[in-house]
């Protein structure tokens, strides 16, 4: 793999760079051929938390992405590699099928000597509940208050200012975000 390792509010030392490359090279065993694109790694420190974000563009438009925040940068790196390995194992068959159909590449991930599970045996994306409700027109502030009152991390509402369906959500930093159509 080729790496683009950068720091945000932190100087990336050679030791950190070597550790990231060594750990991420563990992922090579899952791929049939080397990944032609560059793996992007961003390391940062915010409010005492050491964060690592890794994005691996795959052939066929697929993307592996993980983010981890811990008190120690090396612990964050260890955990992010574990997260990426779990993603690969969980989605290997689906991603192989997608890549094969879209780019003509035979397979992206190795079989690892185990029987490849069929789609029916995989963890399906199972819809377990559907809710239907009327959207009351409200402003963004009221939507945030409603979201907090019901104890959810997001809230769908009709924006009274734009007459569009919007979503407010609570961010990891404790602040709020707004998703608008368009």
Image (cartoon, rainbow, N blue to C red):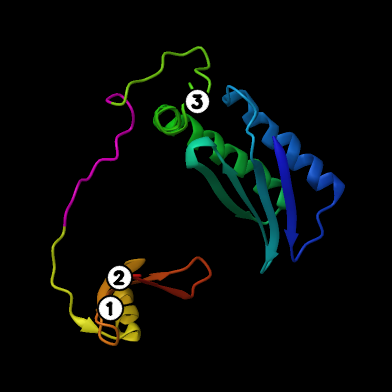
Task: State whether the magenta stretch is mostly helix, strand or loop.
Answer: loop
Instruction: Identify whether 9 is placed above or below 125.
Output: below
Q: Residue furthest right?
A: 14
Q: Which residue is mark 2?
A: 155
Rendered location of residue 178, percent (x, y): 40, 74
Q: Which residue is mark 1?
A: 146
Quarter where residue 170 is shown: bottom left
Q: Which residue is mark 3?
A: 105
Q: Nearer the viewer, residue 6 or 50?
A: 6
Q: Nearer the viewer, residue 92 or 182?
A: 182
Q: Spatial distance from mark 1 to mark 2, Cα to Cα?
A: 8 Å
What number is the disc on residue 95? Answer: none
Q: Specify whether residue 151 is in view.
A: no
Q: How many labels were placed on the picture?
A: 3
Q: Residue at x 32, y 81 (%)?
A: 145
Residue 150 left/right relative to 52: left
Q: Badge 2 local density, few (<14 within 10 Å), some, or many (20+)? A: some
* Sequence-earlier tag: 1 or 3: 3
Instruction: Identify whether 2 is placed above or below 147.
Output: above
Q: Badge 1 local density, few (<14 within 10 Å), some, or many (20+)? A: some
Residue 129 lies in the magenta-colored region: yes
Instruction: Identify whether 15 is placed above or below 154.
Output: above
Residue 122 left/right relative to 56: left
Q: Spatial distance from mark 2 to mark 3, Cα to Cα?
A: 41 Å
Rendered location of residue 104, percent (x, y): 46, 26
Rendered location of residue 42, percent (x, y): 68, 54
Q: Residue at x 50, y 33 (%)?
A: 88
Residue 28 left/right relative to 115: right
1 and 2 marks in contact (CB < 8 Å): yes
Residue 60 lies in the magenta-colored region: no
* Sequence-earlier tag: 1 or 2: 1
Segment colored magenta: 120-130
């Amino acid at each position: 793999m080729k790496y683009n390792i950068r720091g945000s509010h932190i100087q990336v030392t050679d030791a950190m760079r070597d550790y990231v490359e060594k750990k991420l090279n563990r992922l090579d065993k899952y791929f049939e051929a080397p990944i032609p694109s560059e793996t992007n790694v961003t390391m940062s420190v915010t409010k005492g938390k050491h964060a690592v974000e890794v994005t691996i563009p795959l052939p066929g438009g697929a993307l592996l992405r993980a983010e981890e925040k811990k008190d120690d940068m090396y612990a964050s790196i260890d955990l992010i590699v574990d997260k990426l390995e779990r993603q690969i194992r969980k989605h290997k068959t689906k991603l192989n099928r997608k890549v094969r159909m879209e780019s003509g590449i035979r397979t992206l991930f190795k079989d690892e000597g185990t029987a490849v599970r069929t789609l029916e045996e995989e963890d399906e994306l199972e819809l377990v509940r559907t809710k239907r409700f009327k959207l009351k027109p409200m402003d963004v502030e009221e939507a945030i208050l409603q979201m907090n009152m019901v104890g959810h991390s997001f809230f769908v509402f009709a924006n009274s200012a734009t007459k569009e369906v919007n979503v407010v959500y609570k961010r990891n930093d404790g602040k709020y975000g707004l998703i608008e159509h368009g």
